[in-house]
Amino acid sequence: MATLIWLGLRAFVFSLILTPIIRDIFRVYDIVDHPDSGRKIHPHPIPRVGGIAIAISYVLASFFTPDSQLDGAPLVMRLLPSLSVVFTIGLIDDFVSLKPWQKLAGQTVAAVMAYWAGVRVLTVGGHATGNWSTFLITILWLLACTNAFNLMDGLDGLAAGIGLLSTLTIFIGAAIHHDTALIIATLPLAGCLLAFLCYNFNPATIFLGDCGSLLIGFLLGCYGAIWTRKSLTVLSMMAPLMVLSLPLLDVVLAIFRRFLRSKPIFGADRGHIHHRLIDRGLSPRRVVLVIYGVCGIAAAFALLQSFTSNRYVALVLAVLFVLIIRMGIRYLGYKEFTLAGRVFRIRTFQRVLDAQFAMENFSTALRAADTPEDCWHVIRQHYSVLGFSAVHFQVNGTSYREWPPHVTEPEYWTIRIGFSENGFIELARDFHGDDIHSAIGPLADVLRVALTERLGGKPRVQAAGVS
């Protein structure tokens, strides 16, 4: 016990001394992160190379003492080459802003190196994985953890605090399972992060930077994979998934949000979990404390999941945890998922599909019409199917109209599309009618192009208004 206390204390002292030294050096040379009016809300320029202090302190505490060389060094030593790659990629990105594919390529190399060093996810859901599936799952797991912590590094003390809670959780699990190598690998990181938080918690004087957040995420990914080897749970990956759930959830939500909105997957935005909580009126400090509390709950679930050998208990814990996550996502109020949910409901999907079929039929029939009378006949057949209540069609001085007396403002809106100098078509729709908005844009294009082709004139769209 005294040896472990001394190990953690060494890491704490190294980090406590090195962090302000590195902060002041980079501050003197003006190598700092400047605030902006968007995502960077800190009040003044702050150095963002705190990962250097953590990396040096971790190595010093792990290697340069007789105790660590006896027990903990083998695991950390095997990981050192891959950790060096991740740290270097992050450090370069802090200075020259690497492209996403470059960072991902470097992280993949590091993950492969960690795999060959013995970091492997051997079971999923209680089932052993094959050689290739073990390799792919391990690489994906390490990449996910690495980038998850990088994305969470958006507020003072956020990523470092989550990293500390996650590290302590894995340390406790390793201690109960008597996994000496994992104990001695995790404890120095906990000491480093605890000391770093003295300077990084709100108001921060130094940031982790990519070199720090990527390193912490990669280390915790490695720890999580190793933790599963002595876990009693039949759902072997659930424990590390739970303890790292918040960062992993944030990265999954970011990917889906950007995919649904056709935004770059690796782009930056203000839709992360901490941004959503700030938008709901919480101060940055309060957001960090709330997320710490959530991570504490996740840690409790992870430890319970790790120690149960009963399949039904493990399943109940997993389901309960998923339900809590679902409630949290709903509280955050992501509109992208609400709208996507509506679209993928069976009835909505069928209505959209029906509207597209109706549009295709209308387009085909209109392009086959030869005269204005033929065009009018097609329009009369289809306009109500497309959800409109009235139509006015004029071409070459001739007017065709089906406009019931009840179709008047303010219960109806109209759209007017010109297709020649003297020709136009006007459609009216009930404000309270069925939602077929997805067909309106394509309908306007079909009418303008098809009527211009059939009846002549320069294509143009006249002013469309609401009446």
Image: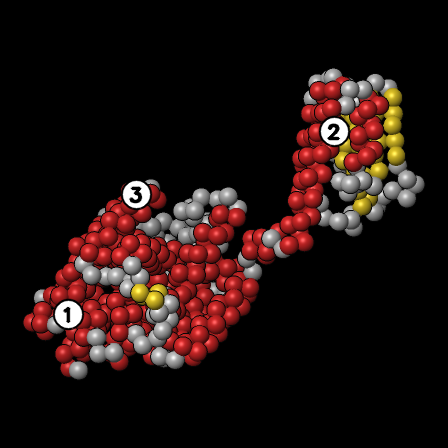
**Which quadrant would the N terminus be assigned to in this image?**
bottom left
Q: Which mark is residue 208?
A: none
Residue type at mark 2 is Ala
Residues tagged 3 and 2 counted as in contact (Cβ below 8 A): no
Q: Residue at x 31, y 65 (%)?
A: 128
Q: Residue at x 80, y 25 (%)?
A: 375
**Which quadrant would the C terminus be assigned to in this image?**
top right
Q: Which mark is residue 102?
A: 3
Picture coordinates of residue 47, whole percent (x, y)? 29, 54
Q: Quadrant of residue 397?
A: top right
Q: How far is the residue under mark 1 from the one under mark 3?
A: 32 Å
Picture coordinates of residue 214, whole percent (x, y)? 29, 56
Residue type at mark 1 is Gly
Q: Which residue is mark 1?
A: 72
Q: Looking at the picture, tell me which residue is in the foreground, 75 or 369.
A: 369
Q: Is residue 402 left or right of residue 196?
A: right
Sequence order check, earlier mark of 2 and 1: 1
Q: Secondary structure at mark 1?
A: loop
Q: Residue at x 15, y 67 (%)?
A: 61
Picture coordinates of residue 341, whole percent (x, y)? 59, 56
From the image, state whether disc 2 or disc 1 is nearer to you: 2
Q: Which residue is mark 2?
A: 365
Describe the colour scheme in one phrase: secondary structure
